[in-house]
Amino acid sequence: MFNSLPHLTTLRPRLGVVVTTWSHENGHDYAKRLVSLFPATAPNEAVEIIVSPILLESENDIPHIVSYFSDKALDANLLIPGNFTLDHVMPLYAQTSGLPTILWGMTTQEAWGAFVGVQQTLFPFHELGLPYRFVVGDLGSSRVWQQILPYARGAALKRRLKGLRIGLMGWRAEGMSDVVFDELALRETFGVQIVNIGLTRYARAVEAAPLSEASQTWEMLKPRFDTSIITLDEVYHGVKSYLAMQKIAAEENLQAVTIECFHDHVGGPCLGCSLFNDQGIAASCESDVPGALIMAVCQMLTGQPTFHVDAIKADLGENSAIWHHCGNMPTRLAAGVDPLILRPTPEHIAPGAYGPAIQATMRPGPVTVVNLVGRKGSLRIAALEGEAVPYELEFPGSAAKVVYPFDLAKAFETLGNAGYGHHFAIAQGHIGDDIGEWCRLSRVDYLLIR
C-alpha cells in the first residue's frame, strides 16, 4: 500500500551501485577497491548510495546481487565498470532488476579497459529498449552528477508515485474541458489511483462538521491571518470545509485531492486547499485531477508546497505573466506578509460563492510552472522556467508574477498549438530537467521552455 507523501521533504533517490569487473583483466584490484571507495565520492546529501558488496562479473553473480538489494527499495541502478567487463552481463542484470540504469564510463588507466567494456554494452541496452543514462567522467565529477541526479530523481518519481491516491470530490467543473482525465490511462502510465468521492459526500461532511470543532481549529489557525474584512461566519465555513476535507482524506488514505468548487462551492475549499498544500497533500482547484497529480510531483521534487493557478494576464513587453486563483495560496509560499489577509470570496465569481479567500502574492525566486493534460495516447506535460518577482496584488485572490527569459507570447502560442490546458502548478526552483527525465521514463511527451 502507498505510504503518505513525506511532509514536504525533498526527494532523495536511492541508487543501487554495482561495480562490474573481469578478473582476467588488469584493473581487477581497483574494481574491488571501488566498492568502498565510491560512496565517499557521491553527493550524499542529494542521493542515497547503497553499494553491493558483490562484484558483477558473470551471470552467476546476478541472483546474489538481486537478493542483496531485494529489501532496499531502490529507485535505479548505477553500474560502474572498475575494469574491462564482458558486455552481456550488465543488460542481463538490468533486465533482472527491472530498474532504470545509469552506466558510468571511467577513462582512467586505473580502471583498465572499463571504458571499452561500457561502450560495448550500450548497443544491447539500446536495442533491448532498456531505460538507461550513459555518463563519462572520473569519480566525484560534479559534471557527471549534474547529469545523474535529474535522471535518478525522475526514476524515483516513477517508482514512488505508484499507488498515490487522488480523491475527486465531484466531477468536471463546468466550462473546463481541459481538466478532463482518463482514469485508466493515469493508472497505466503513472500508477496512480483515482478515488471517486462525490460532491454530495463532501457537501454533507461540511454541513456535519461541528461548530465547536471549527471554533477550536480556528483558534489554532487565526494567529496566521488578518480577518478585519471578513465575517466570522464566512471564516467558519472555510474551516468546516477544511475539516471535511481532512475527514475524507483520512478515511480514504488520500495523498492528493481536488474538488468541484466551481460553481456552487467557490470559496469554501480555498482555505483547506491552502493548508493541505502546506502539509504536503496536493490540493488542486476545480476538479483538476491531472493538476493534483502534477502538484504532487512538484511537491516531491522540491519539498515545498505548490500553487494551482491560471495565467490571468500578461505583459508581453516584459515577458511576465500573472498566475492567479481565487484564494488558495499556500501560506508557506506567501511573500513576507504576516498575518495573511483573509477576505470574502467575491460573489461575482460564481453563483453561491462564499468563504475565506487568501489575499497574497508568492515570494520571489526561481519557479517552474507545469501543466499536465491528455488521455490514453496523448498524455503530455509542459513546463516553463522563470523567476517570481515582487508584486502588489491588483484584484482579489492569490497570485504570482513570473518573469521569463524568453518570448512569452511565442511560448503561449507554442502551448496553445500543442493543445495544453489553462491550469498550471507553480513549483519553487527550476525543476524542468527532473520532470523531463520522469516523462521520458514514463513515455510521456514533454515540452520544456526556458
Image (tube, rainbow, N blue to C red):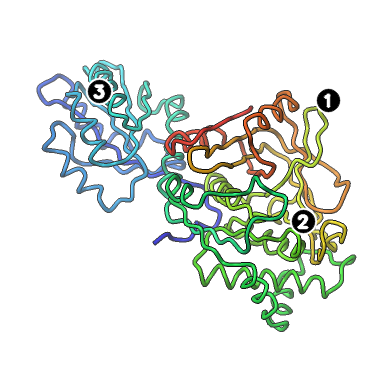
Element type at mark 3? helix
**Mark with earlier residue (3, 2):** 3
Image: 21 above or below 95: above
Q: Locate residue 264, reporting x and y percent.
A: 76, 64
Check whether the beta carbons of the residues at disc 3 and disc 1 lie within 8 A of each other.
Answer: no
- The numbered dot on residue 327 is 2
User: Horizontal placement of 60 versus 222: left or right?
Assistant: left
**Mark with earlier residue (1, 2):** 1
Which residue was labeled with disc 3? 121
Q: Locate residue 391, reporting x and y percent.
A: 82, 42
Please tell me which residue lies in front, 98 or 196.
196
Please tell me which residue lies in front, 116 or 411.
411
The disc labelled 3 sits on which kind of residue? Thr
Q: Residues within 10 Å of mark 2 (few under 14, many from 20)?
A: many
Name the residue located 62 percent from the left edge and 57 percent from the top edge.
283
The disc labelled 2 sits on which kind of residue? Gly
Which residue was labeled with disc 1? 317
Element type at mark 2? loop
Specify the quadrant of the image occupied by residue 239: bottom right
